[in-house]
Amino acid sequence: MKKYADLHCHPHSRAFHWMRHTKYEKKQKKYNPWNVVLSNFKKQEKGKRAFSYSQCDPVKLWNGETKLVFASLYPFEKGFYKGGQIDQNKLIRILDVLATSGLGFLNPITWFQTMFAFITGAPTILKIARAFLQSLLMRMPIRRIKYFISKKYDYYEELIKERDFLASKSKQATRNEIYIPGIKRVFKSTKKMRKKYSESLDATGKYVICSDYSEVKSTLENNEIAMVLTIEGMHALGTDTNLSKVEERIMELKKWPQPVFFITFAHHFNNYLGGHAHSIPDALRVLSDQTDGMNGDIRPEGEQAIRLLLGLNSMLEKDVSLGRRILIDLKHTAAQTRKWYYDRIVTPAMDKGDTIPVILSHVAYSGWSTLQETIDYSHQENDRDLKDGFYPWNINACGEDVIWAAKTSGLIGICFDQRILGDKKDKVNSIDLIWNNLKTMVDVILEDEKLDSTQKSKCWSYFTLGTDFEGYIDPTQDYGNSLLFDDFERDLIGKLEGLHVLDGARYHLTSSEEVEKAARGICFENAHLFLKQHF
């Protein structure tokens, strides 16, 4: 049976958010990732935006043979729910009523609150409406939003809670349970649902959060799920309120029994360390304003944090006293900050014999050749325009990023989000959409004059799957969850075979064996070998 890898996904997040702050939190038998939240199967089958169904929970991972999982921990950012000066206590009291009403976003009271908000325009009510709309759109329980906007919410504490939730079933063979939210429990039978949707709702399996490559290797040999921890966003270290504690918390991360392999430096909102790329569509700005710090440069605190994560002293030399290396993922990092990273960290370290692999965990191609072109366009990014069929925002990788990944034997995860891939209205066939981005990035490598022949001969080895499943994405319709990776690989082989016939020598696809090797590499082996070298 073929195995699959995913460089960036959140396999536990849906269960975590639905059961956090409930009675289940005190019951380990129920409060764990194997208690999967019931999906909306009509939405799942159509490959719609994954607000109401799971894409990569442990059951889908197990039944879909996704056996190498880079599990991303992500404390939800306050910027999604915060904005303007309002009476926070009043807001929390109102949301508390909604949270305890028993019906969540289905409660008619919440519809009244929303309509009233837009009629009156009162700041507090508008904030309530925004929080409710986020709950409606993202199928996030009101109780969670109440917590996110409260003074109690601390990113770092939530990071530890999320880690412990995921770790609660590590190394334990488990048959899943089914969590049915709210009023649906009255009408749905778990026994019938398990039988009807067995591929999505029935599995007995085991995942292991691994401490090093040897444990990854043994877990895969046992045909179990090998998980490696990652973190999405440096805000997770509490940079909004405790910037002075960042260095201390980095050192704590390095001592976790199951270490963090890489950390995505930026995410959607200001982390006070460096610039984040524009990511939220203009149509949603009414809900979330990410302009503070957007598309900016590195800050002194961010420079120090990056050196510490990488275990480098002020001379950019490896220092064993700084602990194990945590790699940097540049997805969501502004192009201006990426340029600094390549110029001031990667290049001088490489000159000293230390090659730091460039990771872009869940991206597509932007259509731009250079970072400077990307930076120049960043102030013009909009919901309408594409560049040669590609999504040109600086959240995506430009040619210069791709070349840096090849030069450092890094790894690029192909995101399965339609918008990021350049299709906003389900107009492009799924495999054509992904293939257009993948092949163009391979062309960038083959056409570069500074990469040597060996680097070019490995042109397919720099890519893997980085779906961003469970990140509330609008996926490519044919590959909307991890049960469908086998379909993707079949279609990918078809594209590679076509390239083999047309120009096999140029693309290092001179035989069917090389076609199979390239496909297997993208679907599993490239991520596996990357771990073997760096974990």
Image: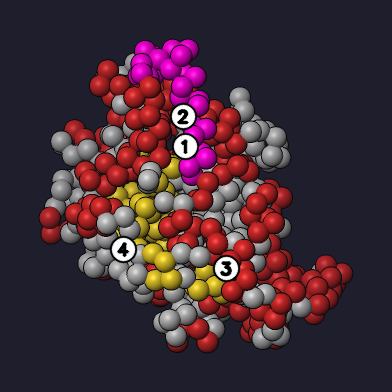
> In the image, what residue type sits under mark 2?
Ile
Q: Nearer the viewer, mark 4 or mark 1?
A: 1
Q: Which residues are magenta?
A: 485-511
Classify 162 as above or below 359.
Answer: below
Q: Determine whether the residue tagged by mark 4 lies in a helix, strand or loop.
A: strand
> In the image, what residue type sits under mark 3?
Arg
Q: Determine whether the residue tagged by mark 1 lies in a helix, strand or loop.
A: helix
Mark on residue 47?
A: none
What residue lies at 66% left-to-right and 33% top-to-bottom? 428
Classify 462 as above or below 468.
Answer: above
Identify the residue under disc 1. Answer: 489
Q: Label 2: how many residues lie within 10 Å, few (<14), some (14-19) or many (20+)?
A: some
| Direction right: furthest residue | 119
Query: Magenta stretch: residue 505 in it?
Result: yes
Query: Chief secondary structure of the magenta span?
Result: helix
For marks 3 and 1 on the same chain, the one whose residue lies earlier in the sequence: 3
Q: Quadrant of the N terminus?
A: top left
